[in-house]
Image (spheres, rainbow, N blue to C red):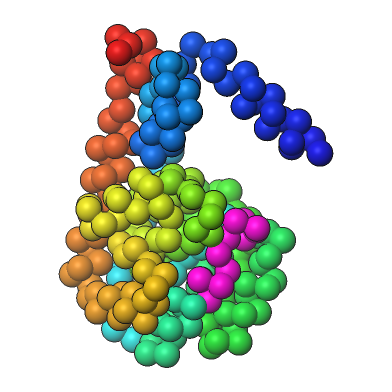
Amino acid sequence: MPFNIWANLRDNYIDSGDMLLCVADAAKELMQNKYPNMHIEVLRPSIQETGVPDYDFDVNREINCCYLGNINYITDIELGVQILSCLAMSKKVTLHIIGGGINLDQFVSELEDKDVHVVEHGCIFDVEEKKKIFEMCDFGINIPKEEVNSAMALKFVEYLHVGLPIINSGLGDNHVAVGQRNLGINIDRDDIVGTAERILGLGTDKLLKMHQNCLEYYNDFFVNQNIDKILFGSRN
């Protein structure tokens, strides 16, 4: 398989480089254990400034969520259906999907069977069009499968960039940031009902606080990176 050939080339020669850049602290720790003599730094992905959507965050009667990106083999469809359908038992829930993917139809079908309303927007790359959709939402959904061990999903970064509170199952840096910086709600796979209750208990004031925390966290850890120091600074 072509991907296996590429993976072997990458893994066999990765320590031939002068520096290895990772997108998350969890990835740096993992690679440092594997390549203890290699110089490794963290350079988090950032997005060109596009402005912040004008959110409403009115969740008294309805919850609107956004899923950004492809729905494929690394997407935890079962978990997404569980958490959204649990919310739908108490309030109307709408999921706006910006993207596609081989498992899109399955995800949509299973959600609709559980009384979750789904709006498929297709693959959108226009910044202003995406902002209009984000404005309708209260949360961004990040639900990678646990075995993928995703520590810095690009959709997570984009949610932060627009200040959209996150319902998250990602591990590593994503999990830590959501918990420690109050950026949203981490899903407890062993207590879906409890997770849903935590989400349902969030009012407008708490969502506005999470919104501001997302913007501040993105600015602190993604925008204000000293790239010159990372690339050319002294090496320990």
Residue furthest right in the image? 1
- State the image coordinates of residue 143 (x, y, percent, origin top left): 49, 61
The structure residue drawn at horizontal position 39% and vertical position 39%, both measured from the top left corner, is: 26
- State the image coordinates of residue 33 (x, y, percent, origin top left): 42, 29
- State the image coordinates of residue 42 (x, y, percent, origin top left): 38, 29
The structure residue drawn at horizontal position 57% and vertical position 21%, both measured from the top left corner, is: 14
Q: Quadrant of the C terminus?
A: top left
Question: In the displayed structure, does residue 124 sit left or right of residue 224?
Answer: right
Which one is nearer the viewer's eye here, 110 or 29? Answer: 29
The structure residue drawn at horizontal position 43% and vertical position 16%, both measured from the top left corner, is: 37
| Residue 152 shows in this picture | yes
**Residue 74 part of the magenta-drawn span:** yes
**Residues drawn in magenta:** 70-81
Q: Quadrant of the N terminus?
A: top right
Question: In the displayed structure, does residue 154 sit left or right of residue 199?
Answer: right
Q: From the viewer's perspective, is residue 194 above or below residue 89?
A: above
**Residue 205 part of the magenta-drawn span:** no
| Residue 196 shows in this picture | no
**Which quadrant would residue 185 be assigned to in this image?**
bottom left
Q: From the viewer's perspective, is residue 10 above or below residue 16?
A: below
Which one is nearer the viewer's eye here, 86 or 190? Answer: 190
Total residue callouts: 0
- State the image coordinates of residue 50 (x, y, percent, origin top left): 40, 43
The structure residue drawn at horizontal position 66% and vertical position 67%, both measured from the top left corner, is: 104
**Which quadrant would residue 49 be assigned to in this image?**
top left
**Which quadrant would residue 92 be assigned to in this image?**
bottom left
